[in-house]
Image: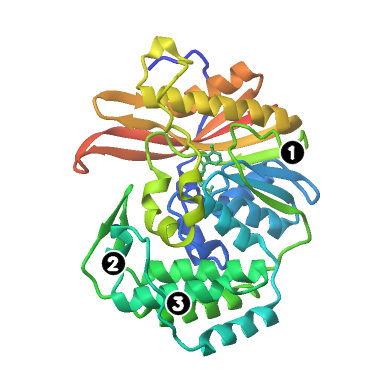
Amino acid sequence: MEVKLKPKIEERYDLGNLVTFIPNKRLPIYNWFYFKEGFSRDFVMLMLDEFNLKKKSYVLDPFCGVGTTLLACKERGINCVGVDVAPLAYFVTKVKVQDYSLDKLRKELDKLFSQKFERYPIEGLSPLTLRAFSKFNLYDLIFFREKIKEIKDESIRDFFLLALINASNKASFALKDGSVVKIVDKRVPPLRKVLKRILVNMIKDLKKIKFEKCKIDVYLEDSRDLGFLKERFDAIITSPPYLNKIEYAKVYKIEYDLFFRAYKDSLRSYIGLRPKNVKDLFPELNLPDIAKAYLQDMNECLREFYRVLKPKGKVALVVAEGAFPGYAIVPTDYLIAELAHRMGFKVEKIIVVRQRIVTKDRTVKVGKARESVVILKK
Ligand SMILES: C[S@@+](CC[C@H](N)C(=O)[O-])C[C@H]1O[C@@H](n2cnc3c(N)ncnc32)[C@H](O)[C@@H]1O
């Protein structure tokens, strides 16, 4: 596919692992919620160095997911704002960046586990959620959920709720497989036991990382309109949803059903999920509709990024090419770089970090899709 702009390309396959969540899996607090779509602490640290960001700088992550960028900034004493449109991601980030009193957490833990079990009615849950748990675990889960709701201090309540979300994942028959959730036949541990272990470990984790004083804010908002933010950022370090890769709302169906009921219908449209009223920014390329919509949305985001960045502000955007059955692979990195260029950004370079094998029906190899970091300067 021909694109006019010819940006500088750097191949850095040694960074491939860093744009995945894998390195975070062994890191306290970073690993409080397994988010397959996330990138790593070390990737953020690398970009903070690359952009020469110091204490008092301001960083934005407009697709903050589970808060990797915010936590890394907090370690360095760099002010950071995170935005995400998904209530679950926003919630996880908030819990991870909060400061806690260990004493209060320990007291609440003792209190929670000293309460007598009560059976709450199981109402209004989806058939999928009902199939995902044994009766025994489901009654326990609802009991703990209701008891946690009674905790008065909001940050402590959220801390416990995140532990319960993780415990419910471990104690369920559900398996996340790509974009779908499957129910599998497997042995599951008792929820109560898992919850206690997770809480004890989370409390221990809080002593393992040293954070510097800085300002960290998280917003449940849509990054196509950052009207609530001013021009103040030195850098944006982020990764938008990958084109045609994952439907975030579907994979976390059970979590939404159990813990975010009030939000369920208010989930705003995700990038790429608005195939109606599409403006084609690359008419010469004959792109699939979903790619046109995605690029239109990304264009709106880029406009906002340009507005909130200070002059000379930098952007690191982790993106991947999108694969479509019966269509060539869409070079998302080049196309976003082209849009950024039209917007007034200088495209400094595209760092190619991975080549993913693209398969049809999960077995037939149909090509390769690049994963890259697009570096821009205002
Ligand atoms: C690739 S993930 C980011 C992961 C993150 N770097 C981390 O390490 O956790 C993309 C995120 O963008 C969010 N998102 C999708 N559309 C959005 C929008 N319009 N505004 C803000 N966030 C959005 C998704 O909910 C998802 O959490």
Q: Which mark is residue 316?
A: none
Instruction: Decide: is 169 above or below 302.
Output: below
What amino acid is at disc 3? Phe
* Image quarter hosting the N terminus: top left
Instruction: Decide: is 154 above or below 49.
Output: below
Report whether the residue tagged 2 is closer than 8 Å to ligand 1. Answer: no
Q: Report which residue position mark 2 lands on.
A: 173
**Marks 3 and 1: CB-CB under 8 Å?**
no
Q: Report which residue position mark 3 lands on.
A: 143
Alpha-carbon distance for marks 2 and 1? 45 Å
Q: Secondary structure at mark 3?
A: helix
Mark 2, mark 1: which one is toward the viewer? Answer: 2
Report whether the residue tagged 3 is closer than 8 Å to ligand 1. Answer: no
Q: Residue at x 35, y 76 (%)?
A: 137
Q: Secondary structure at mark 1?
A: strand
Q: Residue at x 68, y 27 (%)?
A: 306
Residue found farthest to the top: 284
